Image: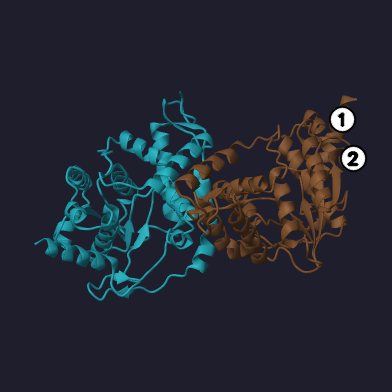
Chain colours: A cyan, B brown
């Protein structure tokens, strides 16, 4: 099959646009949509120091590579990568290695921050000690370390590799759970004191396009799933959206557009509140003590009881 | 199994509340939610003349029966039923008969209005003549006749039998299609000149509960589906919501609550516009000529070409 734009061999059929794309035009189109999202939400501005949340999985590797390709030459923008090592035996070490390799190849400053060093135990230990789900510990502590490290490094933005599939799943999940407040948290460019602003340059990119992008640039791809991963509700929504998109290509964009239409309302309904400094650790929190400190103390008590 | 409220035999297990209900408590609970919805959105007020859109299918029969049971004794409220006979051979005649029976039993004034008499042809003929989908003709002409007849009868409200399943499907459909304007049209109690206000007393009732209500009162139930019915996108959403509700009971209520949370926004984003009187027929329309007149003229032209 020929490319819809030139005489070359197509490597990808883009269902939502009905176009066949050769390698060159696939990359052009992919990166155009990254630049479009970045521009639309002013994700990258002059003077920015962007911390990239780089797990070493396919999405964040592609993000690091793409941001470097598109903005790496700019003198007024700086990139740094942060890898959180949660301590998940068998699963995390290979991706930490990938993160090390890609940042070294691209010449991007790289920081590895571990649960073990910061909270005294790896996620594997937390799971054995505590009564919460693994994703609770991981979600709270990972976000905590990403934000704190980014801020300490002087980063003005924190880039995550959430793609169109991730975002639309979360949008629909919150809508179906009647959690409009959580839906409002997805509004881009929200500023809160102490929180480094999150940016999502892949928000207009399908997950499978990320895979193709990795393949075309021969980027290291770890496709393993976290052994603790357990989100049955999200999985149901993911599968529905997958089928729906399959039958009616482009519907994930429709979900994104619906959400975007509601943004002015969501901002009005849920104005940003000022965060407090946690009484224990000083990190930002809407409460008196941050969730990371609450969980850490719970785990420490559990550890002492065992002794 | 015993009723969760008394010693009687349960006839229904209400998954979203985890309760088993006997006949008496099922009816009490069902009607309580009808009264709740009616009160919440002031659907029925003193002095109202309510036109019930009564197709003769299970939902509208249950609605007519329930409204009569709950509000029939009130001196300050009047009910009248309107049945639209689209002219669908084999499908519509039995339900028109059911509509005649139930209104006669309840002593409710009943008006049957047909496509044939008003537009010169039955839906069956339109489908053969025109190039649009059956649901296009049916949707436009049915709403047209319902509104015009209700207004001519002096009705202040037009009650339709849309239930929780219908409403949540439409909400999700519009959200997934990025049609937030159409989502805004679902906001209850919208007033527009020339349009009789729509009310949906069953908006908090699951479809299967309507079936049980019909069974318990031995109401005539026609469960046939329209032979023209063809909504593949809606069917995909219906099936997903069915599975999702099945796995996580109560989620249809969540969808309704999400929508309701957004109502103030939707009203602000899409304020009601004044409608024009159609240049051809005088009925309300946002354009110069109403959609019913456009379709009617198309069909008349098609008919003449055949002669």
In the rendered image, the vertical position of residue B137 relative to residue B164, given as above or below: above
Q: Judging from the image, what secondary structure is the residue with disc 1 in?
A: helix
Quadrant location, the C terminus of chain B: top right
Q: Is residue A116 visible?
A: yes
| Quadrant in the rendering for residue A290 | bottom left
In the image, A149 versus A183, the foreground residue is A183
Furthest residue toward front: B7
Q: Chain of mark 2?
A: B
Mark 2 secondary-structure assignment: helix
Chain under callout 1? B
Of the image marks 2 and 1, the number of the one nearer the N terminus: 2
| Residue underneath mark 2 | B117
The residue at the point 17 percent across, 66 percent down is A301
> Mark 2 vs mark 1: same chain?
yes
Pick the front one: B78 or A280: B78
Numbered badge on residue B303? 1
How packed is label 2: few (under 14 Cα within 10 Å), some, or many (20 or more)? few
Instruction: Tell me the residue at 56%/58% (across/down).
Output: B259
Q: How many marks?
A: 2
Give the answer, above or below, for where B87 lies relative to B76: above
Look at 74% across and 34% down and name the residue there: B132
> Residue B181: x and y, percent?
63, 54
């Amino acid at each position: 099959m020929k490319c819809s734009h030139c005489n070359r061999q197509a490597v990808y059929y883009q269902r939502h646009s009905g176009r066949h794309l050769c390698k060159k035009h696939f990359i052009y189109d992919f990166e155009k949509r990254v630049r479009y999202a970045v521009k639309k939400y002013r994700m990258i501005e002059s003077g920015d120091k962007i911390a990239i949340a780089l797990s070493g999985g396919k999405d964040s590797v592609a993000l690091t590579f793409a941001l470097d390709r598109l903005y790496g030459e700019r003198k007024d923008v700086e990139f740094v990568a942060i890898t959180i090592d949660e301590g998940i035996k068998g699963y995390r070490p290979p991706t930490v290695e990938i993160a090390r390799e890609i940042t070294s190849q691209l010449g991007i400053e790289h920081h590895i921050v571990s649960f073990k060093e910061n909270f005294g135990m790896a996620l594997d230990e937390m799971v054995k000690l505590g009564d919460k789900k693994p994703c609770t510990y991981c979600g709270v502590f990972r976000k905590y370390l990403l934000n704190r490290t980014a801020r300490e490094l002087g980063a003005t933005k924190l880039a995550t590799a959430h793609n169109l599939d991730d975002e639309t799943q979360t949008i629909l999940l919150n809508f179906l759970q009647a959690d409009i407040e959580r839906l409002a948290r997805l509004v881009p460019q929200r500023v809160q004191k102490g929180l480094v602003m999150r940016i999502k340059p892949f928000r207009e990119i399908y997950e499978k396009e990320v895979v193709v992008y990795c393949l075309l640039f021969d980027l290291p791809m770890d496709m393993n799933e976290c052994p603790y991963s357990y989100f049955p509700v999200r999985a149901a929504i993911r599968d529905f959206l997958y089928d729906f998109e399959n039958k009616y290509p482009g519907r994930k964009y429709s979900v994104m557009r619906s959400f975007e239409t509601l943004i002015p309302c969501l901002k009005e309904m849920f104005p940003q509140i000022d965060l407090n400094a946690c009484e224990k650790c000083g990190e930002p929190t809407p409460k008196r003590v941050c969730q990371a400190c609450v969980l850490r103390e719970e785990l420490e008590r559990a550890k002492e009881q065992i002794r």
